[in-house]
Image (cartoon, grey):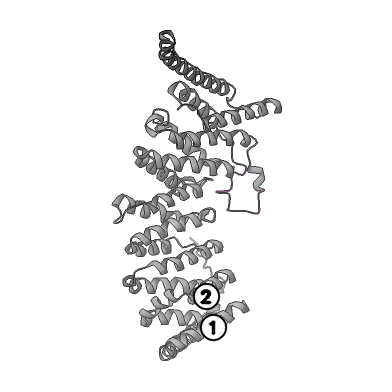
């Protein structure tokens, strides 16, 4: 009986180390499995045979599956080779652009087949990005900071120049997740992204990932506290506003407009700086860019303080009127539709005495001279609305226009008469200038 009780008491003591041993053994086996998979997941050369590439892709799938549900948190023994494998796969020289003469992918959207920009190695790289995203989201940032350092982040940032939109999308998710979790890197990451944008604006205007970088910035700006720091306001004035002047703005205008609108919504007093900046970089010959900027100005007006309406009414209405008179029917029609915006109309009516002379002259010029029938019809509709707003002032502006035109006609008549007199005088004295010279011979 005593032997049985001793046996029952002793059995748990033998069971505990056995379970611990099995657990450690299982964990070691998992680490060995991961290390074995990593050894097969080195950089895949496009010249390799399809069978080798498929084998590596299969190993990457297995590695991703193991990392998604590890039996034990990954330690340095596994993380070091794993991060090294990720760097070896992703940090590579990118191929030269398919068309170096094009500043960005959307300058001439009809000239290129977007499928030609897809990387043949994407099926391999996609899994590597998925593994990296999983590590960033599941492992503590203090553990990863010895592997994800400043050079690693700079190498990631350089990959935004890839022409493959699928890679840039995955890269955006990874980079943004690192920004969210690695709070101690945020200032460095903001400065690095700002440097890329400044280089694009003021150096070569050739970069495929500006849209993705601005998407990240849009999320960052959305989280800025109010009142805004001076550093953030300088970013708006020195980086975001100058981005409106590039030729490739069509590729990223949606993201840029969102970033700018976030600033104005947080501090409406910045609206005047933004509007004047856009007017400063207004294009002269790019009609598509004009249409985009007209839409952005219209949205900005809705977020402006009413105190700024008086200051911005004249420059805004002057630019919109110039667009109304554009020979491009798209630009003219888009500018005319702005008058359907109640905020814009409210701004114009607050400074109606200053604004109306310019606006009325533009409308009358369109009705008389514009080649597009649809533009003339829209102009007539706007004219009716303006006359209903203040018929007396509209009539007064018409009289002033007539006076100026009459004075211009009189000046033209006087100029022509003066030239006629000059021509007549020149005809009378014509023989003096064209008589053959007379020579006198003198003998010595």
- Counting every numbered tag in the picture gives 2
Pick the residue in front: 122 or 211: 122
Mark 1 neighbour density, 10 Å: few (under 14) some (14–19) many (20 or more): few
Quarter of the rendering containing residue 149: top left
Quadrant where the N terminus lies? top left
The relative height of residue 27 versus residue 323 in the rendered view (above or below) is above
Q: Which residue occupies 41% across, 91% down?
A: 392
Circle 2 residue: 336
Residue 45 visible from this viewpoint: no
- Provide the residue span drawn in magenta: 97-112
Quarter of the rendering containing residue 192: top left
Circle 1 residue: 381
Mark 2 and mark 1 in contact (Cβ < 8 Å)? yes
Pick the residue in front: 387 or 171: 171
Quarter of the rendering containing residue 54: top right
Residue 228, x across and y down, in percent: 30, 54
Residue 380, x across and y down, in percent: 55, 84
The relative height of residue 249 versus residue 347 in the rendered view (above or below) is above
Residue 25, x across and y down, in percent: 50, 17
| Numbered disc 2: secondary structure | helix
Considering the whole magenta stretch, tell me its main secondary structure: loop
Q: Earlier in the sequence, mark 1 or mark 2?
A: 2
| Numbered disc 1: secondary structure | helix
Q: Which residue occupies 61% across, 53% down?
A: 108
């Amino acid at each position: 009986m005593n032997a049985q009780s001793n046996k029952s008491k002793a059995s748990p003591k033998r069971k505990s180390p056995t379970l611990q041993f099995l657990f450690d053994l299982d964990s070691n086996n998992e680490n060995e499995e991961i290390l074995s998979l990593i050894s097969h997941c080195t950089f895949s050369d496009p010249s390799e045979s399809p069978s080798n590439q498929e084998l590596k892709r299969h190993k990457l799938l297995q590695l991703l599956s193991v990392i998604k549900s590890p039996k034990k948190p990954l330690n340095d023994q596994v993380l070091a080779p794993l991060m090294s494998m990720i760097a070896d796969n992703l940090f590579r020289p990118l191929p030269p652009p398919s068309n170096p003469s094009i500043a960005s992918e959307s300058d001439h959207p009809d000239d290129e087949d977007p499928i030609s920009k897809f990387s043949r190695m994407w099926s391999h790289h996609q899994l590597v990005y998925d593994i990296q995203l999983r590590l960033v989201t599941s492992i503590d940032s203090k553990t990863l900071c010895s592997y994800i350092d400043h050079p690693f982040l700079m190498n990631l940032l350089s990959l935004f120049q890839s022409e493959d939109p699928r890679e840039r999308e995955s890269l955006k998710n990874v980079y943004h997740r690192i920004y969210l979790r690695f709070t101690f890197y945020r200032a460095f990451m903001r400065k690095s992204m700002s440097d890329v944008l400044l280089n694009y604006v003021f150096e070569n205007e050739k970069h495929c990932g500006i849209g993705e970088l601005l998407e990240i910035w849009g999320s960052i700006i959305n989280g800025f506290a109010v009142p805004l720091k001076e550093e953030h306001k300088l970013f708006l004035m020195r980086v975001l506003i100058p981005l409106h002047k590039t030729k490739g703005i069509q590729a990223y205008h949606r993201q840029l407009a969102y970033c700018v609108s976030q600033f104005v919504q947080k501090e409406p007093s910045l609206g005047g700086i933004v509007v004047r900046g856009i007017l400063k970089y207004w294009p002269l010959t790019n009609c598509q860019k004009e249409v985009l900027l007209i839409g952005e100005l219209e949205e900005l007006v809705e977020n402006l303080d009413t105190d700024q309406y008086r200051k911005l009414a004249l420059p805004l209405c002057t630019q919109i009127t110039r667009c109304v008179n554009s020979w491009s029917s798209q630009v003219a029609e888009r500018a005319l539709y702005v008058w359907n915006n109640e905020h814009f109309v409210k701004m114009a009516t607050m400074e109606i005495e200053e604004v109306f002379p310019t606006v009325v002259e533009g409308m009358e010029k369109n009705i008389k001279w514009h080649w597009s029938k649809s533009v003339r019809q829209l102009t007539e509709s706007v004219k009716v609305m303006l006359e209903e707003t203040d018929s007396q002032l509209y009539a007064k502006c018409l009289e002033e226009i007539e006076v100026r035109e009459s004075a211009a006609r009189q000046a033209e008549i006087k100029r022509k008469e003066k030239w006629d007199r000059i021509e007549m005088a020149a005809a009378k004295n014509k023989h003096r200038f064209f008589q053959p010279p007379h020579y006198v011979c003198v003998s010595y």
